[in-house]
Amino acid sequence: MSDTSAGPRLLGPAEVRQLAAELDLRPTKQRGQNFVIDPNTVRRIVRESGVGPHDVVVEVGPGLGSLTLALLEVVDRVVAVELDELLASRLPRTLAEHAPAVAERCEVVLSDALKVTELPGPPPTALVANLPYNVSVPVLLHLLALLPSLERGLVMVQAEVADRLAAKPGSKVYGVPSVKAAWYADVRRAGAIGRNVFWPAPNVDSGLVAWTRREPPSTTVPRERVFAIVDAAFAQRRKALRGVLRAVAPAADVDAALAAAGVDPLARGESLTVEDFVRIAEALPHATDQQPGQQQDQHPDQQREDRS
């Protein structure tokens, strides 16, 4: 890496407002735009993520570039995926102005992160992002599935979603995001973020989630089949598995599968590990691929779309 002793100049409140004014960008609740204005916060995110000089980092929703600049202080390359054409077109100039020595290390990809099928350059090793809150779980799961080279990551999401992603079996907030994330990685809560580091201040709290890639469970059935069982199990989370799994298979097959998997038919989805779901899926080989609980990937309180 070249000498960056001068370092990128990070964005503070004045710089963020100046950029927003230049772009005639008026953050609204409808679009959920809340931009990070505190350099200490983005440096903390980078530090907590554990990325270093040899990492290739994917960032989703770079916005005005607050976190991007902090990443360029540390890592070898950033691939920034931005859906908003206005923000994506301005970001390279912002990086050139604030981090001229390292700006070329960032490549901006104008795309919806949920529709990305490949990324340019060498395989990424980490995901560090302020994920768009209304699609944070689907984006995380999509990238974990798409990019097996990702070894670890740290993302900022809505606090409730952070709790769900990191929840363990038996927790009241354990659900579809918890199980599906556990398929790919060991997930943990990595702290909280105050509302005053954003402009404008949001009406929800934020949390950090860190994860480390792990080998997925060994199974004879496709991941999609396991996830269909997970979705069904939480579609009516107050009901026992014996009842809710009838949405994907006949009652007799469900009873036999639960017995074969060693799972109590009166148990609820929230008590099962990802390995339990794998055993059930293997014992229900003819289950339909309908996914009645897929909407559980998101949460009605996830309100924000674009964040920097």
Image (cartoon, helix red, strand yellow):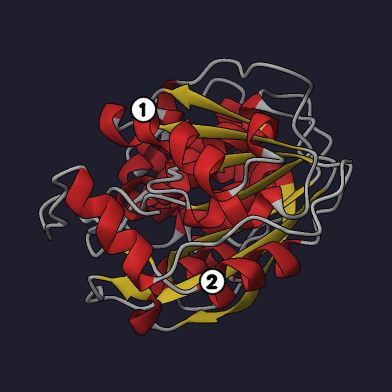
> Residue at horizontal 64%, vertical 69%?
43
Q: Is residue 271 visible?
A: no
- Label 2 or label 1, whichever comes before in sequence order: 2
Tell me the CA gap for discs 2 and 1. 22 Å
Foreground of the two, 184 or 48: 48
The percent coordinates of residue 293 (x first, y second) are: 35, 44
The percent coordinates of residue 56 (x first, y second) are: 76, 36
In the rendered structure, the answer to whether residue 225 lies left or right of residue 53 reads: left
Foreground of the two, 293 or 167: 167
Which residue was labeled with disc 1?
89
> Residue at horizontal 47%, vertical 74%?
38
Q: Amino acid at mark 2?
A: Pro
Badge 2 element = helix
Foreground of the two, 199 or 145: 199
Q: Report the label total.
A: 2
> Few, some or many C-alpha atoms within 10 Å of disc 1 (few <14, some 14-19, many ≥20)?
some
In the rendered structure, the answer to whether residue 257 lies left or right of residue 238 reads: right
Which residue was labeled with disc 2?
39
The percent coordinates of residue 196 (x first, y second) are: 34, 83
Q: Amino acid at mark 1?
A: Ser
- In the rendered view, would you say 49 is above or below 172? above
> Few, some or many C-alpha atoms within 10 Å of disc 2 (few <14, some 14-19, many ≥20)?
some
> Residue at horizontal 51%, vertical 27%?
108
> Residue at horizontal 33%, vertical 69%?
14
Q: Quadrant of the N terminus?
A: top right
In the rendered structure, find residue 235 and report the number of the disc placed on it. none
Image quarter of residue 23: top left
Badge 1 element = helix
Image quarter of residue 304: bottom left
